[in-house]
Amino acid sequence: MRPLFLLTITLLLPLGAAERPNIIVILADDQGSGDFSANNPQSKIPTPNLDRMAAQGLRFTDGHTSSGVCTPSRYSLLTGRYHWRTRLQSGVLGGFSPPLLAQDRLTVAGMLKGQGYTTGCFGKWHLGLGWPLKDGTTADDGGDYSKEYKKMGQIDYATDIKDGPLEHGFDTFYGISASLDMPPFVWIKDRRVTEIPSVTKTWLRTGPASPKFEAIDVLPSVIDHTIAFISEQKRAHPAQPFFAYVPLNAPHTPIVPTKEFQGSSGISPYADFVRQVDADVGRLLASLEQQGLSESTLVIFTSDNGCSTAANIPELQKAGHEPSYVYRGNKADAYEGGHRVPFVVRWPGRVKPGVSAALVGQIDFMATFAELVGVPVPAAMGEDSASFLPVLMGVKTESRQGIISQSINGSFAIRDGQWKLILCPGSGGWSAPKPGSKEEVGLPLVQLFDLSQDIGEKHNLQDKYPERVAAMKAELERLIARGRSTPGDDLRNDVPVQLIKKAGKKKLADK
């Protein structure tokens, strides 16, 4: 097999400090690849602002998360390291989970801050926080958000959060702790809640809430605070570049479009919410234009995983809309619909508009941004990140040969060019055949697909190409054992990594 990464080259004309662009990463929550009409010609949900961004930038058709669910994808995006090298081997964190990021783990924000960038995070964190308890310890819900955290009432909301975005490279943070349907229902500014939770509210789950906190306000407020951050940087520090990480809460549940968008799609509340995401991204891009920052700002739009079953996919399909486009599965799955996502990069005047079939991942942001600002990634950091800057600059047509993804139950999938191997008999997630279901009984234990001929993953070729199955499985084992998938000295994973996950009926959901 060829290596799963390709060495990139340094730009012939590295950017000077004065030329370093502002960087904005917009991360939608549960928006499928087909919920973006530039990707999906048959889409029934118009996304004119995202389509305009795609027309002005480079749209990747083979862009991926590291997981079919959000917490692991967010970890990999910010660190350039696969999440399964940490304690998070399946599922996602809860609203009262301790931090997944180690204190010494470099993030994209920390790397850019070290290069003179002002850094801000606005939106859904969902990587764990050091919530202080009144006895001096910190909260730990064990990641079990399916039931009420027994120490929920002991949290000291009047003191600083002990470990959050500001401890991981961000100068400022305004957002929520986890998914919008997970308590606590509070706004956090930097290290403090903006209003002590004194009431109880329910958005799918019930928990402590600030009296003025309303789910319907979150998406517009996230965009408002991002625009305010950018405006302040332009006013007070015009010569200093900024990095804004904007992890949206939408169109994840609770599906709460504002009044302006309710009924606007003519399909469903989820489709209305997708339209609002598009409009709010348009507001952010318009603000850049109004402030004269478009040409000096690199903007990325992507999503943390595929469309959720909570969107009522049959309702969308009845209207002729496929949220995963031509890909099999959806959120939580090892199939393409779980982790192949919208992926657009716009930088007017520097990134030539077009469409790229290069295989890229959000895990590559670390190496890409490091090369962009002209610094190496530290040897023990960003160990799975490969720069796709040469692809953006038109110097190369590919940046990596393969990539690794997981489903919600931790089942592995590995790419090698056109080939994809899944190490479970079904989806590993929420699509049929589900883990531990009757539909899985009797199926081969692994699945091999030739995506160049079978993008819908319908024809399992594992019995026809046993040598390829063995080679790809061995390569995955090697990359796990090495503690990295890029050149360099071997490193340690945080925990032992189990290659094959046992089928079970444990409910794994974050919707």
Image (cartoon, rainbow, N blue to C red):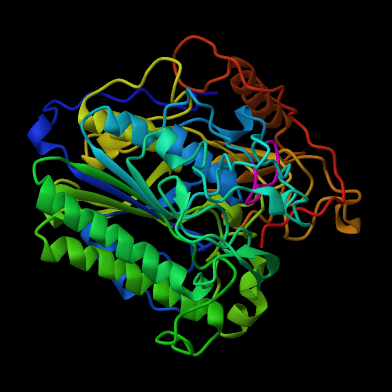
Classify residue 456 as left or right of residue 174: right
Q: Position of residue 412 (x, y in %)?
A: 67, 38
Residue occupying image coordinates x 82% and y 51%:
435
Residue 50 appears in the rendering: no
Q: Is residue 119 above or below residue 316?
A: above
Q: Which residues are magenta?
A: 89-97
Q: Is 145 left or right of 373, judged from the image as shown?
A: right
Is residue 90 magenta-colored? yes
Q: Quadrant of the N terminus?
A: top right
In front of the other: 123 or 331: 123
Location of residue 278 by image quarter: bottom left
- On the question of residue 124 being in view, the answer is yes
On whether residue 69 falls in the magenta region, the answer is: no
Tell me where residue 140 appears, x and y as whole percent: 69, 41
Estimate the x, y position of residue 353 in percent, counting from the top left: 21, 55
**Image: 283 above or below 395:** below
Q: Residue at x 19, y 65 (%)?
A: 287
Q: Residue furthest top?
A: 489
Q: How many marks?
A: 0
Position in image of residue 467 (x %, y %)? 70, 27
